[in-house]
Amino acid sequence: MSNSSNVRVLSWNVTSAIGYSFVLTIVAFIVSVIVKAFYPPSIIGAAPLLDLFTSPAVGIVQLIVLGLMLAFTWPITAVRNELKNARSVALFTTIGYLFFSLLPYAFPGAVGEYPQTFFGLLIASNILNGALAGVLAYKLNV
């Protein structure tokens, strides 16, 4: 592969991973809202690992949904080689999301007092997650 082709693959991996990270954030938030509707004592959040400890019902459902989203990227047909890159991006983005989604909650006051800080950190964590996942998918290509 030529160098320009390598750069193109890397940039597509990073771009798609950033987009997928935002999709995971939206899905996790929607899942927590749905669980909150059926189980009022739960909290609304978008960090599955944190929600697993603060509101186990939300965390468990979020992890199940993230696992299902990852399972749907696993190719089982003859197009395995063509989908290998998409699988790598989804795998690294989902794993990274579990940890990067904790970033907005790591700063005191960001959740309640300063919502603009929370949303800024949420955007930054998705961009960082996507960049790291895209590079890892390019370098490791599981």
Image (spheres, rainbow, N blue to C red):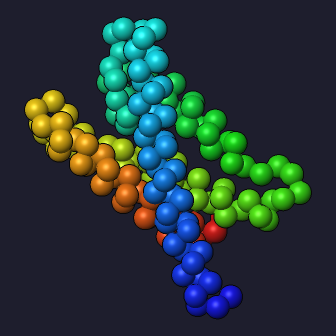
Which residue is most to the right? 78
Residue visible at 41% across and 57% down in the picture: 129
| Residue ID at (55%, 66%) | 13
Marks counted in the figure total 0
Q: Position of residue 81 (x, y in %)?
A: 79, 65
In this rendering, position of residue 6 left or right of residue 27: right
Q: Quadrant of the N terminus?
A: bottom right
The extreme bottom residue here reads 2
Residue 74: % across, % down: 72, 49
Residue appearing at x 49%, y 66% in the figure: 14
Most foreground residue, 133 or 17: 17
Percent coordinates x, y for residue 115 in the rendering? 18, 36
Q: x, y percentage for residue 38?
A: 46, 8
Q: Quadrant of the C terminus?
A: bottom right
Q: Nearer the viewer, residue 84 or 13?
A: 13
On screen, residue 86 above or below 99: below
